[in-house]
Image (spheres, rainbow, N blue to C red):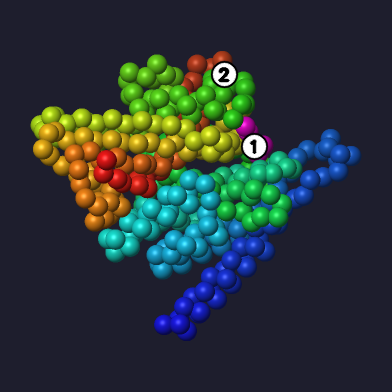
């Protein structure tokens, strides 16, 4: 047992070493004398591939071992919370959800030209072997002395039209939460989308967003649960809250922004008098474990959303192009 542990640990350290070597590659800030030159990408396409594939390879090994302790070596941000939950569910069910798959094939890499930090890469993968949708990966390097880590993953919606970006050899500029010249600033758009998730058609922002798969499926699930709750005189409530500073922005070739952000939510369900509120999914059930049910249950979710915000003045709507949603905590109140 001890020998096997040391072998696995050695393999993981070796994988981490490869990431360390690739993760810190890239262009350092250029002297001010060169500031008039056209910005160039921080990484080559080959470097992006090395960083991404080594992260995915290490993550695959952690998945196989159901190892949550070492996830922070390659993950951060919402993806760390989501993957920790997914592996805890896998430990309880002996089954790792298919949605955790990250394909190794690449459709497009969008590499930042920014000279400072943090730096990001938006990598759009190919479809999975079983024809699941493409993934939008956000790789983030927080400082010059840290490796790139996988910050966020959003599964792209079927049939969605992605905005265009500059080619990888040219690079794209990173945006910010306060970018102007758009139909809505990124931080405002994320807050408006959270309101839309919470209030559906009753949201005052409903007319400013195109329809999307996340809202459609979430609304259908909520209605299904509501019918069951009403039979037992129960109630439910969901609240959605953008997470401060949990946002990555890349500017598109047409003057818009692609924003990937974290929105946390709480789903509280109260059963009627004398009844118990139960988990609403296999994942919730696995996370609740041997907990004692009461009349009220609250589930905390981490939601990652990818929003395309077009330029102002064209009458275009903000479009959600992908998302990920995972329960991370289930408790009886």
Tell me if residue 246 comes above or below residue 73 in the rendering. above
The residue segment tinted magenta is 172-176
Q: Is 326 a magenta residue?
A: no
Quadrant of the rendering where the C terminus is positioned: top left
Assign the magenta stretch its main secondary structure.
loop
Distance between the alpha carbons at the discs numbered 2 and 1:
18 Å
Across and down, in percent, residue 196 comes to 38, 25
Residue 11 shown left or right of residue 212 in the figure? right
Give the total of numbered labels.
Answer: 2
Identified at 65% across, 45% down, the residue is 119
Could you say where residue 308 lies in the image, as x and y percent from the top left? 50, 31
**In the picture, residue 102 is in which quadrant?**
bottom left
Q: Quick one: label 2, few (<14), some, or many (20+) residues within 10 Å?
A: some
Camera-near label (2 vs 1) is 1
- How packed mark 1 is, by other alpha carbons closer than 10 Å (few <14, some 14-19, many 20 or more), is many
Q: In this view, does 24 lie to the left or right of 284?
A: right
Whether residue 7 appears in this view of the structure is yes
Task: Give the residue drawn at x 49%, y 36%.
Answer: 243
Q: Residue at x 17, y 36 (%)?
A: 271
Q: Position of residue 128 (x, y in %)?
A: 40, 54
Query: 45 or 14: which is nearer to us?
Result: 14
Q: Considering only order in the chain, which callout, 1 or 2, is on the residue closer to the N terminus?
A: 1
Instruction: Name the mark on residue 53.
Output: none
Out of 75 and 232, give the one closest to the viewer.
Answer: 232
- Residue at numbered disc 1: 174
Secondary element type, mark 1? loop
Q: In which quarter of the image is the N terminus?
A: bottom left
Residue 98 in the image: state x and y as whole percent.
34, 55
Name the residue beneath numbered marker 2: 312
């Amino acid at each position: 047992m001890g020998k096997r542990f040391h072998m696995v640990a050695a393999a993981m350290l070796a994988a981490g070493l490869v990431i360390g070597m690739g993760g810190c590659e890239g262009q350092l800030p250029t002297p001010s004398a060169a500031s008039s030159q056209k910005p160039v990408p921080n990484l080559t396409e080959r470097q992006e591939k090395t960083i991404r594939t080594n992260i995915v390879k290490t993550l695959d090994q952690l998945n196989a071992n159901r190892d949550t302790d070492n996830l922070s070596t390659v993950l951060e941000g919402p993806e760390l919370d989501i993957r920790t939950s997914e592996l805890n569910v896998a430990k309880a069910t002996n089954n790792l959800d298919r949605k955790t798959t990250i394909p190794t094939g690449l459709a497009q890499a969008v590499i930042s030209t920014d000279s400072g930090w943090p730096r990001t890469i938006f990598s759009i993968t190919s479809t999975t072997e079983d024809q699941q949708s493409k993934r939008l990966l956000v790789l983030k390097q927080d400082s010059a002395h840290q490796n790139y880590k996988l910050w966020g993953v959003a599964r792209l919606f079927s049939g969605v039209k992605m905005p265009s970006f500059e080619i990888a050899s040219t690079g794209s500029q990173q945006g910010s939460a306060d970018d102007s010249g758009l139909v809505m600033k990124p931080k405002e758009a994320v807050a408006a989308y959270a309101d839309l998730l919470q209030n559906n058609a009753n949201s005052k922002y409903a007319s400013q967003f195109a329809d999307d798969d996340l809202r459609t499926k979430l609304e259908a699930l909520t209605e299904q649960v509501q019918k069951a709750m009403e039979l037992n005189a129960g109630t439910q409530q969901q609240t959605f809250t953008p997470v401060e500073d949990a946002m990555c922005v890349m500017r598109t070739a047409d003057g818009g922004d692609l924003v990937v952000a974290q929105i946390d939510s709480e789903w509280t369900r109260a059963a009627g008098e004398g009844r118990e509120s139960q988990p609403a999914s296999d994942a919730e059930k696995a996370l609740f474990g041997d907990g004692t049910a009461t009349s009220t249950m609250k589930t905390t979710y981490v939601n990652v959303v990818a929003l395309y915000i077009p330029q102002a003045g064209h009458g275009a709507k903000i479009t959600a192009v992908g998302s990920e949603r995972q329960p991370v905590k289930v408790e009886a109140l």
